[in-house]
Image (spheres, rainbow, N blue to C red):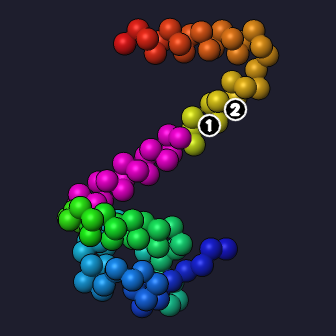
């Protein structure tokens, strides 16, 4: 089970995060905490997302809505990379003639654009 953080623990853990900034990020849905007996709690993934949001905010002066869009795009990119790894694994598992046919078809498709 992954560790959870209360709002107080979250702000103490992420040095750049302030309560006001967290409120702004919650409104932009950069993270969505879950409800527990302790109140709202955050997961380890939320910590990573908030660290990235704070870094982008400070370095590029990005507003919360822009940060939300940027982090969403990063999430999509990571998802696509994971799917591509699965496809590549499936291609690798095929017999040589099938694999060669797929490689040729993908190569032709790439250069037709």
On screen, residue 20 versus residue 88, left or right, reads left
Can you see residue 73? yes
Q: Which mark is residue 85?
A: 1
Range covered by the magenta-colored residues: 65-81
Q: Main secondary structure of the magenta part?
A: helix
Q: Residues within 10 Å of mark 2 (few under 14, many from 20)?
A: few
- Secondary structure type for disc 2: helix
Quadrant containing the N terminus in the rendered view: bottom right
Can you see residue 7? no
Q: Which mark is residue 54?
A: none
| Percent of width and height locating residue 60 | 23, 61
In percent of the image, x 77 and y 13: which residue is there? 96
Residue 2, relative to residue 102: is it above or below?
below
Residue 11, relative to residue 1: is it above or below?
below
Q: Residues within 10 Å of mark 1 (few under 14, many from 20)?
A: few
In the image, residue 27 lies in the stretch drawn in magenta: no
| Residue annotated with mark 2 | 89
Residue 39, relative to residue 45: is it above or below?
below
Quadrant containing the C terminus in the rendered view: top left
In the image, residue 67 lies in the stretch drawn in magenta: yes
The residue nearer to you, when weighing 33 against 87, is: 87
| Percent of width and height locating residue 66 | 23, 57
Residue ranking furthest to the front: 59
- Secondary structure type for disc 1: helix
Q: Are marks 1 and 2 in contact (CB under 8 Å)?
A: yes
On screen, residue 39 versus residue 2, left or right, reads left
| Percent of width and height locating residue 65 | 22, 61
The residue nearer to you, when weighing 68 against 33, is: 68
| Percent of width and height locating residue 107 | 53, 13
In percent of the image, x 49 and y 47: which residue is there? 78
In percent of the image, x 62 and y 37: which residue is there? 85
């Amino acid at each position: 089970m992954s560790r959870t953080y209360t709002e107080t623990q979250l702000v103490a853990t992420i040095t750049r995060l302030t309560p006001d900034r967290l409120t702004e990020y919650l409104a932009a849905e950069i993270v969505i905490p879950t409800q527990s007996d302790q109140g709202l709690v955050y997961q380890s993934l939320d910590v990573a997302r908030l660290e990235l949001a704070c870094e982008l905010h400070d370095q590029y002066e990005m507003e919360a809505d822009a940060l939300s869009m940027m982090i969403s795009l990063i999430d999509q990119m990571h998802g696509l990379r994971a799917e591509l790894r699965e496809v590549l694994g499936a291609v690798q598992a095929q017999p040589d003639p099938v694999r060669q046919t797929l490689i040729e078809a993908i190569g032709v498709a790439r250069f037709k654009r």
